[in-house]
Amino acid sequence: MSLFAVRPIVVQLPHSPVPDLGVEAELRYSPQDPFAVCLAFPDTDGPLEWYFGRELLEQGLHRPAGDGDVHVEPGSADAVLVTLGNKTWRSTVSIHGNDIAAFLAEAHALIPAGTEHLHLDLDTLIHDLLN
């Protein structure tokens, strides 16, 4: 069994001038941060990474979810729309729902839903917060 879940994906930018252009990205999950997933985009200066709740991604497969910097909702056909942003900008990416479902299955095989709290390394977390 792998220690991480990593799924290479191709996303589209539906609100861009080229909405059908595919952009390479990855969905990542690490048991070291059991509540979070990462959506990463390659960049020449290193990947651009967005971390948000695994549960948020799962909820967004079926209904709109998220009130903060990340919003996930079903789109047309098999697409799931993930909107990333802050106070000054927002960007929406479209991801195939099958890719998200397969990625979540891999993540749940590592840490089943509802057991995330059992896998937190609180000593390391406290150490990192204090230093």
Image: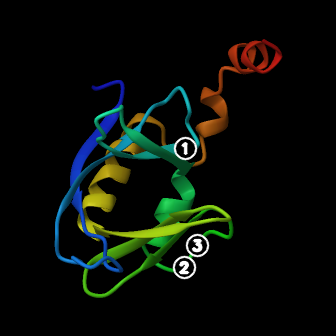
Q: Amino acid at mark 2?
A: Pro
Looking at the image, which residue sits at the far right?
130
Please give the residue where the numbered disc 2 appears in the rendered image.
64
Q: Are marks 3 and 2 in contact (CB under 8 Å)?
A: yes
Q: Is residue 58 above or below residue 107?
A: below
Please give the residue where the numbered disc 1 appears in the rendered image.
36
Which percent across, then down, holds residue 113?
53, 48
Which percent across, then down, holds residue 66?
62, 69
Q: Amino acid at mark 3?
A: Ala
Name the N-terminal-most of marks 2 and 1: 1
Q: Quadrant of the N terminus?
A: top left
Residue 14, located in which quarter of the rendered image? bottom left
Q: Is residue 13 above or below residue 44?
A: below
Which percent across, then down, holds residue 112?
48, 43
Residue 65 numbered tag: 3
| Distance (Cα) linking label 3 and label 2 | 4 Å
